[in-house]
């Protein structure tokens, strides 16, 4: 491990905490308090003045300032004492299910931004002879795992909103109104996240291509541009198929990510210990 990899791994820890916030959009009544506190501590430590990401942001003018502001907004919204999205209730952690899209907006945008920052360091390392293939490969698996994890959540959100929309249409006797328009706007936002992920995904990955194709076919059935019955299937079947394909991608990419992360983490700890020993010797 060298200083470049160490620096990128410092940025990565913040990216990881952003990804893990996906848990808080899931339909669970409560969440683990200790895990929540650990995540809060990790992301706050990753944003202190001397941390790699904070140093990078300070060196990049208005762009860095905007990213920092967005990160601070995310921390306040999820881990702040006055958070309205995720909060502590006694010994429990609860999330406001009505703010899932606000959470997704943070996660999708910030995670992609930090991915771009880390890729920038990888590209630079190839020019200054500090490139380590192990880090590059790890980040590629991390990206695949993140996108598959995010997309299965997006399919679940689309499914839930689709059911809400149909229920609202039934209640209004098939006439659009404020309730249906509100749900439709939310649906469009989630579909927008899915399209964004598709645009930024690895186009050479056949498994991802199949999962995205199934997800967009599901959307075509939902909106009626394709008739499921004409192709001998149902909308429910296509939702199940899209979700199954994303689950396959999670099953492929999570073990690779987890193994490579542990290896890099152990090397990072050893590297930090060596650096600390050098400082003491001096």
Image: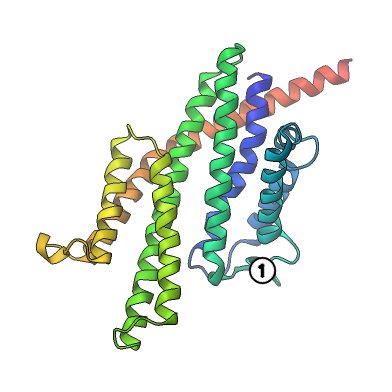
- Residues packed near mark 1 inside 10 Å, few (<14), some (14 to 19) or many (20 plus): some
The C terminus is located in which quarter? top right
Viewer-proximal residue, 22 or 226?
Answer: 226
Where is residue 219 drawn, in percent x and y?
29, 60
Asked if residue 4 lies left or right of residue 182, the reply is right
Viewer-proximal residue, 281 or 143?
Answer: 143
Residue placed at 37% from the left, 82% from the top? 168
Rendered image coloring scheme: rainbow
The N terminus is located in which quarter? top right
Residue placed at 65% from the left, 22% from the top? 4
Viewer-proximal residue, 260 or 73?
Answer: 73
- Vertical order, 39 against 171 (above or below): above
Residue ID for mark 1:
84
Residue lying at the far right of the rendered structure: 282
**Element under disc 1:** loop
Q: Quadrant of residue 82?
A: bottom right
Residue placed at 71% from the left, 33% from the top? 60
Viewer-proximal residue, 149 or 186?
Answer: 186
Where is residue 270 drawn, in percent x and y?
68, 24
- Vertical order, 178 against 250 (above or below): below
- Vertical order, 64 against 234 (above or below): above
């Amino acid at each position: 491990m060298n200083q470049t990899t160490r620096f990128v791994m410092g940025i990565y820890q913040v990216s990881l905490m952003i990804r893990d916030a996906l848990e808080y959009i899931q339909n669970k009544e409560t969440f683990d308090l200790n895990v929540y506190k650990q995540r809060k501590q990790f992301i706050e430590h990753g944003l202190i003045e001397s941390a790699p990401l904070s140093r990078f942001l300070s060196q990049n003018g208005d762009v860095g300032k905007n990213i920092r502001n967005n990160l601070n907004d995310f921390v306040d919204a999820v881990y702040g004492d006055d958070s309205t999205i995720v909060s502590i209730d006694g010994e429990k952690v609860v999330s406001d299910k009505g703010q899932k899209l606000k959470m997704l907006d943070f996660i999708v945008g910030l995670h992609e931004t930090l991915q771009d920052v880390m890729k920038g360091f990888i590209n630079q390392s190839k020019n200054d002879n500090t490139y380590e293939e192990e880090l590059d490969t790890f980040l590629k698996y991390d990206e695949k795992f993140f996108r598959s994890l995010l997309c299965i959540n997006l399919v679940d959100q689309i499914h839930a909103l689709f059911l809400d929309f149909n229920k609202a249409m039934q209640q209004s006797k098939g006439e659009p109104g404020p309730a249906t328009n509100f749900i439709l706007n939310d649906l469009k936002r989630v579909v927008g996240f899915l399209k964004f992920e598709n645009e930024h995904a690895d186009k050479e990955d056949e498994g991802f291509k199949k999962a995205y194709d199934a997800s967009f076919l599901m959307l075509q059935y939902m909106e009626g541009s394709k008739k499921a019955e004409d192709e001998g299937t149902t909308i429910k079947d296509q939702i199940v198929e899209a979700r199954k394909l994303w689950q396959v991608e999670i099953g492929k990419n999570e073990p690779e990510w987890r193994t490579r992360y542990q290896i890099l983490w152990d090397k990072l700890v050893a590297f930090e210990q060596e650096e600390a020993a050098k400082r003491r010797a001096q």
